[in-house]
Image: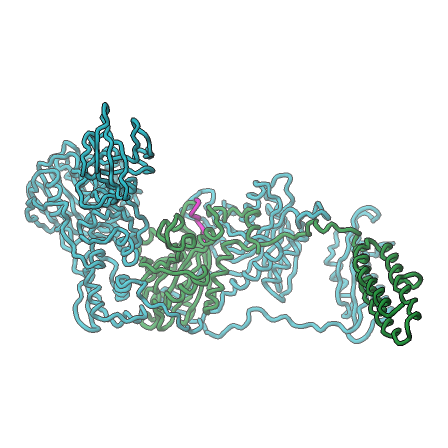
Amino acid sequence: MTLDEFKAACAALAADAPAQIAAVADLDAWTALRNALVGRASGRLTDIMATLPQLPKEDRREAGQAANAVKLEVEALLTARESGLSAAAKSGGDLDLTMPERRRWVGAAHPVSQVIDEITEIFRELGFTIALGPEAEHTWYNFQALNFPDDHPAMDLHDTLYLQGDLVLRTHTSPVQVRTLQQYAPPIRILAPGNVHRRDPFDASHAPTFAQVEGLVVDEGITFADLKATLTHFANRFFGSTRTRFRPSYFPFTEPSAEMDVLCGVCKGSGCSVCKNSGWVEILGSGMVHPAVIESAGLDSTKYTGWAFGLGPARTALARHGIPDIRILYDSDVRFLEQFAR
Amino acid sequence: MNISHEWLKTLVPHTRSADEVRDLLTAHVATVEGFEHTRAELASFVIARVMESEKIPDTKLSFNKVDDGSGTLLEVVCGAPNVTVGTMYPFARTGTTMPAGLVIEKRKIRGFTSNGMLCSARELGLGQDHDGILPIETAAAPGTPLLDVLPISDVRIVVDVLPNRPDLLSHRGVAREVSALTGVAMVEPADWTAAVAVPAPVVGDASATAGGVTVRLDDREGCPRYGAAIIRGVKVGPSPEWLVKRLEAIGSRSINNVVDATNYLLHGFGHPMHAFDLSKLEGSTIVVRRAAAGETLTTLDGTERKLTTGMLVIADAAHATAVAGVMGGRESEVTDATTDILLEVASFHAGLVRSGRRALGLSTDASYRFERGVDDAALPELLARGAAYIAEIAGGTVETKLLVGAAPAPRARVSFAPSRVARLLGDAVPADEVVALLTSIGFDVQGSGDALSVAAPTWRHDVSRDVDLVEEIARLRGYDRLPDTLTGARPGNVPDHPLHTVGRRVRDALVAAGLLEVRPLPFTTQRAESQARVLNPLAQDEAYLRLDLLDTLSRRAEYNLNRMQGNVRLFEVGTAFLAGSGAESVGGEEIRVAALLMGASRPPHFTEPKPPAFDAWDAKALATRVAQAAWPGATIEFAEAVRDGADQCLWTVAVDGSVRGHVSALTSLDAPNWASPAFGVELTLGAMPVAYVAPKGEHRYVSAATSGPAVAPVRYVPLPAMPAAEFDLALLVPTHIAAAAVEALIRNTAGELLESVVVFDEYRGKGLPEGTRSVGWRLTFRHPERTLRDKEIEGRRAMLLKTLEKELSVVPRSA
């Protein structure tokens, strides 16, 4: 026996051991293998060690180190395998790991709420806070304070549900503009999400109750440039890099008034059935706050200017999820709502 | 408003394409929401020249070589007798669909190949002429689209006219804008020769008589001015082709030449006109007055209508014969037998037209325009124009014109400083450009520099303040030309509304708990005597506003059950409408959260094929979770509720001592027998005041002092340093004694070292004395500074048992 032969025997053991250990299926087999490899009585390593005295004295130290290294290596593998086997034994033996996990019911915010949340987050970054108002609203807040001429066709744009006394179900979230302007001094930067109600028949594209998100900025020195810049920033954040287009419109409570379109997400502006071949999709109505509205709240319209917008998040929710009928949003079928878990 | 591009060009002869006009209008005037090529079915036809032609023997057919601009001559067989070499004809290439639906394909005829079809006028739907193919005289090259060559195509541009711009409800109104935007001057429409002589009107203040006709205004407010033209000797009949085409282009159908002429004037110039059969007007008299009580009128649509006393009507000497500005009467309608006409061009009070058409439930092209405002100043011009046009196409003589009433007051002038433009738009517009832009759309601008005085043209009713002028400047320049630089902003003064913050926390907690949010309609049927009602509901069975959210959630659960979905877990954060003191009125609003649980409490798994159903304890836990999310750190207490009402209220939920809501078994749910019981939680997050913030037109500035965090921070409790000592009490509790009473007694008796007391077990049934149940409590004691000795624990146990027996007759359960 030479040192080289001794080392070769150690190396052979180290080479064989991992596969043998991995192949062991239970604790009994493991014990047998351990005895065969490193057992004191008749293990392979013990046999190798037994040849140590045959080596020249000066080689024995090196040979002993080699044998010890192999021993540590094999024992570590054995220990690891043992803990694996005993864990398996504790958990009832052979788990079929292809079986399904134990689930819990998943919750989900309504898809329209998710859109409102996303809008809110973007405007929060720009310093907007959240204001709320009642849904049963005084006609003054809903119409007159917002510069709607009495008994005028402008009122026909809002098919109104009337309540007893002086109240209506608010037809838009714009009354919150006046309430907020009455209660707080500028600078005002608010978002007012909420439900509004119109006397619209419940069909595939109309609902008598739907969400709206109102935005209002009033301060000294606010201009149409701020409106365009802020809403374009919002559109880019919300829809991903896009382009906006502003075109003339009419709301009694803004002057000038503007509709904002973004490039159609489907055709990117070349025209398709989604955008009725215009290349653009209407997103929101906006405008500079009419001085009459600022005056309704007892503020000085020569000092303060502002801008406002309103958008309907349901339409965005329908478009982004490919929902063909708005009534599905109201049905509240659990199988529908579960799809929006995240 | 439907605009015909060809019609528009008769008023402003611009050379822009219809596409360009659409884009100009959308960018500067009003949105074009529809755009439709008439004759779109002919879009793929081209013109082609016959280069060679030879007769096919023994047939009527010819074999031709045709240049369709493609570079190679096409072989085409044609059956028409008039094929002429060198002439251009409409040509359908293979693959083209004919208006009748046939698709042209390559085919063999008598051994000759035919690659397309030369077309007749009839085959193209352009007339009845089928004598041969349609020769076209043009300088255009072969292959040019047919519609580019023949003057038959038109584009219908549908403009979304909003209520502030009734001046756009006519071709002339839109033409004014196009003229301003393109710089092309307006012209007289070439459709008319304007050769008919029209006499000057006979004027009167409140009445006038001329040519045997009297016009009298009994209601000067309702009708400030009335124009009438008498045209005698007309011949009612079909309209000329061009007029039919104009009306078709805007989606209107031809009726007869007189009616068509008034419709042309309505859509061309924006002023509704009405032609009466003069012979049917009793006393040859027009009286504008309010309807008499009980008066009726059969309108043009054949409906007999009851008139109300407030309604403005046009009457003859005896009866109402039209509802002013809304619709004429059948009796005085122009028919084929009509020879003498009274043409009405009048101004009516917008509000009266509006209330009249609403009372009748009738909206017409006329009422639509009168309600929004017509150009009253143009009345004399349009009376002359109308009379001339009718006489031109229907014949007859314009005998007399009457003009009764007063001209409208001149427009109030608006002071305008061009420097104000920058204040609103963020960009200065040079003063001379301001003047040029306003002038281009008919505004009268006087003064100079920064002190202008501006009067709107008579057709504009939406300009009363300087901001209105800024809007004109902004849109005419183009919104896209205005700057859009994002600049810094001062932080706002308005704190987040606390109910929004609370609502978000509650929603997040419920989503995390596995519930699904709904956003349903708040309408319901009547549930209580005094409940807010919608006065004009869409559906009578949903005329009421909900008093509570669980009402809505129950209906949504039933919807799911109807679709065989029995595992329902829904929630809503929404508005409840409280009953007011008046009948069916709203007394206030509350923002509430409600949740409904029914069915399996978790999805089945192979380790648990039948998971337990949601029960009252799950609902109670959910209520606790929601209350904790809504009011962090608050004391939440459940009190056994008085069980009444359709649904069984199990507990009321109090937060820091005040009741905020309840947990209920929803026993009134309309559920099939396979459904599990349903449980509901409803808590009021806060009131949403409906009251005025401040009196109308006033400001109530609330201190800007920030309110600080809405929720008091949780106070840290040090972790125990000493070990706890525990023991269990298994007690026989008489059925009528509440567990909470036992627990309260334990807490009061056990001393201050008691750390917690928790129910861990309940047993009812065999082995227990009648009228008792066994409840197990685990008590944990801890001393802050030392380990408790066994003796101390034993002493407490003995004392507790003694007190429990004495006070509540609760004894330990014997082993």
Residue A209 inside the magenta-drawn segment: yes
The residue lying toward the viewer, choosing from B355 and B338, is B338
Q: Does the magenta stretch include residue B77?
A: no
Compared with A206, B753 (above or below) is below
Q: Chain A in the picture: what colour?
A: green
Residue A313 falls left or right of residue B98: right
Name the colour assigned to chain B in the rendering: cyan
Instruction: Tell me if residue B799 can be seen.
Output: no
Residue A240 horizontal side relative to residue A58, left or right: left
What percent of the width, then of the height, locates residue B168? Answer: 24, 53
The answer to whether B623 appears left or right of B228 in the picture is right
Please tell me which residue lies in front, A90 or B594: A90
- Residue in view at x 82 percent, y 55 percent: A24
Judging depth in this view, the residue of A269 and B81 nearest the camera is: B81
Give the residue furthest to the top: B58
Foreground of the two, B109 or B641: B109
Tell me where the magenta segment starts and ends, as one range.
A203-210
Image location (x, y in percent) of residue B318? 16, 38
**Dominant SS in magenta:** loop
Residue shown at 62%/58% (left/top)? Answer: B653
Q: In which quarter of the image is residue B154?
A: top left
State whether residue B673 is above or below residue B463: above
Location of residue B249 in the rendering, given as x and y in whole percent from the top left corner? 24, 43
